[in-house]
Image (cartoon, rainbow, N blue to C red):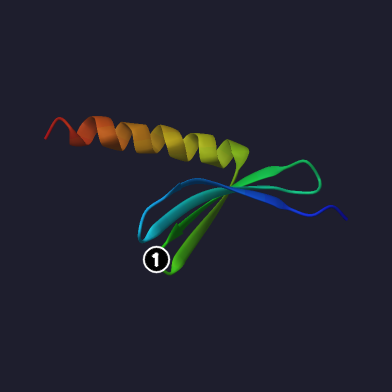
């Protein structure tokens, strides 16, 4: 079985976003938010990123 390769996307003092390239060719995305970690498959990550963009856009209106 191949090793999983991980890569940091972005990191702050308390939060971390990273990817894992799994041995089966699947890339998963992970958000570590203090003591909570969210795991996403590619399609879920894409939808989450759309949501995050909408949040940023709407937050600027208020």
* Image quadrant in which the C terminus is located: top left
Q: Residue furthest right?
A: 1
* Left or right of 41 in this view: 26: right
Q: Quadrant of residue 44?
A: top right
Judge whether 15 appears above or below 43 on screen: below
Give the camera-side residue of 22 and 48. 22
Which residue is depicted at the point 46% across and 40% down?
48
Image coordinates of residue 4 in percent, x first then y, are: 74, 53
Q: Callout 1: 10 Å neighbours few (<14), some, many (20+)?
A: few
* Left or right of 28 in this view: 4: right
Image coordinates of residue 19 in percent, x first then y, are: 59, 47
Counting the numbered discs, the total is: 1
The residue where tag 1 is placed is: 34
Q: Residue furthest bottom?
A: 35
Which residue is depicted at the point 20% across and 36% down?
59
* Left or right of 51 in this view: 2: right
Q: Quadrant of residue 50?
A: top left
* Left or right of 60 in this view: 9: right
Which residue is depicted at the point 39% across and 66% down?
34
Which residue is depicted at the point 84% across and 52% down?
2
* Image quadrant in which the N terminus is located: bottom right
Image coordinates of residue 43 in percent, x first then y, are: 59, 36
Q: Quadrant of residue 3?
A: bottom right
Instruction: Tell me the SS state at disc 1.
Output: loop
């Amino acid at each position: 079985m191949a090793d999983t390769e991980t890569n940091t996307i972005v990191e702050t003092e308390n939060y971390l976003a990273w990817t894992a390239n799994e041995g089966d060719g699947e890339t998963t995305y992970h958000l570590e938010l203090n003591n909570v970690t969210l795991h996403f498959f590619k399609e879920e990550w894409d939808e989450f990123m759309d949501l995050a963009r909408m949040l940023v856009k709407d937050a600027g209106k208020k």
